[in-house]
Image: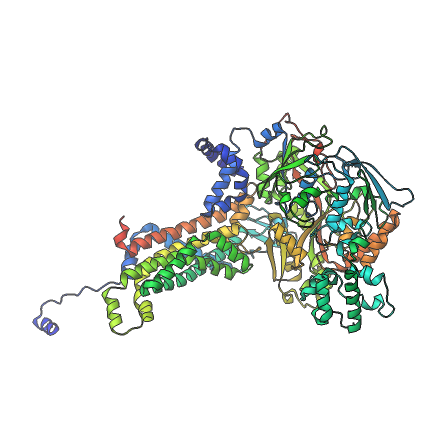
Amino acid sequence: MKFRSTIQQSDKLACQRSEDSREAESEDSFKMNHHGMFANPTGLVRGVLVLALAAGLVSCERPDRVEEATKNKIFLAGNGAEPKALDPHLVSSVGDSNIMRALFEGLVINHPSDDSAHLPGVAERWEPTTGSDYKEWTFHLRKDAKWSNGDPVTARDFVYAYHRILDPKMPSPYASMLYFLVNGEIYNKNLVEEIAIKAAPNPEYPWESIKEVEFGANDQSENNLNKKGLNGLDLETLKQVQADLSTYEWPEVLSDEAKQYILDAYVAFYEAGRTVQKERPAGVVAKDDYTLVCNLEDPAPFFPDVVKHTTWLPVHQATIEKYGDMTDPFTEWQKPGNHVGNGAFQLTDWRINAYVRVRKNPYYWDQKTVKLNGIDFLPLDNQFTEERAFRDGLVHYTYIVPGNMIESYRKNQREVLRVETYAGVYFFRCNTLKGPTKDVNFRRALAYSIDQETIVKYVTMGGQMPAYGFVPPSDAGYKPPNKIKFDPAKAKEFLKAAGYESGKDVPEFTILINTSEAHKAIAEAVQDMWKTHLGIEKVKISNQEWKVFQQTLKDIDYDVARSGWIADYVDPNTFLSLWNTTDSNNETGWSNPEYDRLLKEAAGVSDPAIRYKKLLTAESLLLDQLPILPVYWYTRVYLLHPDVKNWQPLLLDNHNYKFIDLEAADTPPVKP
Amino acid sequence: MISSSASDSGVPVVEIEKGSSLGKDAWYRLQKNKLAMFSFWFFIAITLICFVVPLIPGIPNPNKTYPDLKSMDAFQSAVSKDGEKVFYLLGSDYLGRDIFSRILSGGRVSLGVGFLATFVSLTIGVLYGAVAGFIGGRLDTIMMRIVDVLYALPFMILVIILVTIFQNSLWLLFVCIGAVEWLTMSRIVRGQVLSLKNQEFVEAARSLGLSNWRIIIRHLIPNTVGPVIVYTTLTVPAVMRLEAILSFLGLGVQPPHASWGSLIKEGADRMVSDQALLIYPSIVFAATLFALNFLGDGLRDALDPKTSKD
């Protein structure tokens, strides 16, 4: 640690010199750590110095920031990237949902140490209606649950929230979680054809003959109207299409009469004042203020697990509608001061790229359990910065640990390093709509030439498991098929089958990653594996900031993109349902009717053995078609300050912050 | 008459002192500046090493990874699990790539950016400044106000926007940087031209009927060469530093390719566990920047003796 000691020497000077300004400096030292380079375009050297100073300032004799925070019971948590929004209906990343879990409380909440246990949240108790085969669930809400402005939380708030996330106008990335509800999908996708055409069959134009029409959105289409799909067009536009059929792209086999028939049906549907949402209401009803009934499409014995997810959180109607319409996505209501939640904590401050600050919610029903006074979520998306912040006593908890530091922590500071099983998979998505990855054999060649073991052993180094399949192995009884083992000879055969004599003929394509040194290292390793084993030379790596990256994925505007998926609940379905044609997180363009059918069948079965068998067949199909290239199964590797109490390992890592406590440990951690 | 009488009368021939050119004088003065000369040769050496040494067979491919041989120390050779023997002159990085050859390949990018971007800025800046200065009047005012406006734009953000638009292209990155670096150059040249344009040789050229364009190209620009050379040697390191900052922000070269800036960033992130990753590229980069700055200083003294004694 020679380098370290020289930094500290020079810091002594800095400490003396800036005695007076220290307070102000350390207040912002996160920002400096994080953005010192932006603030100082004058020079790299100076940037490095600023960084060293900022990191060093805190290591002066004065108590660490975490010590003070522990005293005040403020939990300082590294939280990955800057949150996309503070609205449970707009977020989809792990870091964002951590914040949601502090700000909101669902019907059922996470147990502090057992993922499959259910604790009463807003719902006091719940039960499936007898005889409904787990298809109807009643939740009895507690009377003392309150919003952070004092309003009572009622069953109507949940109904409002579920209608909001399912509304076709709401750009919610995760609405598919609510397809469990009866009509959830029809409602969310505004499937007019289901009612106007399929439910009123016409012998002249049977459904089979017209089902190829783009009723739903086609993001890949050149034609603007087709992008929205017939279901996305309003009455006026439909009438324009009716007047000029060529403004819409139809399947070639369709006669003009058939087109007219479809448009007539649509126009008549709207002109009669009918809407999908009215005729196929989502399966959620408030029987009275404190009784919520959910009707499900398929039997789901695990339904209480599902409603723990952030997408099932309630929102406060009056607040949302004060600052805009129900479906306006990014309005002022998410700002501190306006934000209203019902969780153990409420939002007090949010500074972009600095922190999201939440403090105890005075109206929370279970005040006596809440130990913390607040949490600061810090967007530290550079894992090295985050690790430095931990070392310098700026955070209690890191989101991740850089691979190169794991060994040193294992040796010198075992007590802060946490290595836990984590139900997640790291993989690459392939664009199955265009580019070289459109060819299934090419995708197979790519998949079989990724040496997962080398990546796990030498690049990530966190005890991860090489992923030979997609669904991580678990104790629940599902055994993944494990097909994709590194095999360069097989990969070469597939490359030939894809029509490339050698890797040199492969057209240029890009691996897209979100900005992070860890993803970069893995991408570089994979890039070189493809070069070594397949001879593919023209692979580029490009990086995008998290929010942009998510949008690019959504638009399917990439060749190969780094991805990860963490279980929403303990069941292989949470992984496999991703690749359903209609899933909003599919984002590869991959669509396989056989696969969709298998999943649908599996959903209708309540016997786990038969269900797993069907899911297994589905996963084998997925691993044969490979819209994704599996790399490894996650382990959770992070740093946790010994002051943090009641923090138990969790398979899904959804910690319920109201159980977390802070108490100064007897022996402060030794600095490495 | 003079010549014949001189030879006839046997009077010893007076050697007419041979005029020495500006360049020769400058070179002579520069040679007396030891630091500048050392920097000059050092810079040539670094450039040659970066561009020539990788051609020698046996120098490892800078992008070839050996994940099982990561973080090796300097002067070590090892056998990878695929049975390849690798010798690491300066050790290996976090994917087992050879640091020495990565510094060389990074140097090609950094120096390339330095030269190319400087060339772009030189071309735009000199022509723009010369035209504005020589034509003068309203055109000059308009042109220089444009420069003022561009000056006022936040420089870093402008480059970031340009890089974002022309993503993934190293060549465009060079051009982008050059295109925002020409402003000072144009001001310097304009100032020079303003002081030159009323001198007799320009009058003479004009009276011979030369076109404005020809006067600018043939008579004015060559006379501004001193300050331009000096400023150029100072632009090269500035541009290299800018590229380093962009790479540090993740906007520069795309992986797996490296520049000195991106190597330093990778090293800075891992400086606790892998000091070598930070130290070697930083030393090379800093030494090159110092050399170019000393050379620029020395050239200023050499080309413009009047202002050198300040």
Query: Which residue is pictured at 59% across the width and 45% down the height?
Result: A382
Percent coordinates x, y for residue B303 in the rendering:
29, 57
Q: Is residue A489 visible?
A: no
Q: Position of residue A315 (x, y in %)?
A: 71, 42
Q: Is residue A390 visible?
A: yes
- Residue A576, compared with residue B5, is above or below; it is above
Of all residues, the one furthest to the top in this rendering is: A666
Left/right placement of residue B43 relative to residue A128 reads: left
Residue A85 percent coordinates (x, y): 64, 46
Which of A89 and A11 lies nearest the eye of the viewer? A89
Image label count: 0
On the image, the x and y values in percent for residue B27 come to: 30, 58
Taking A478 as reference, is B64 above or below it? below
Pick the residue in front: A526 or A396: A396
- Give the quarter of the image for residue A364: top right
Residue at the extreme front: A272
Q: Is residue B133 left or right of residue A382?
A: left
State the residue at coordinates (73%, 58%): A627
Which image quarter: residue A187?
Answer: bottom right
Which corner quadrant holds the N terminus of chain A? top right
The residue under the point 41% across, 63% down is B124
Q: Is residue A320 left or right of residue A35?
A: right
Which residue does the image show at 83% across and 56% down from the upper left? A598
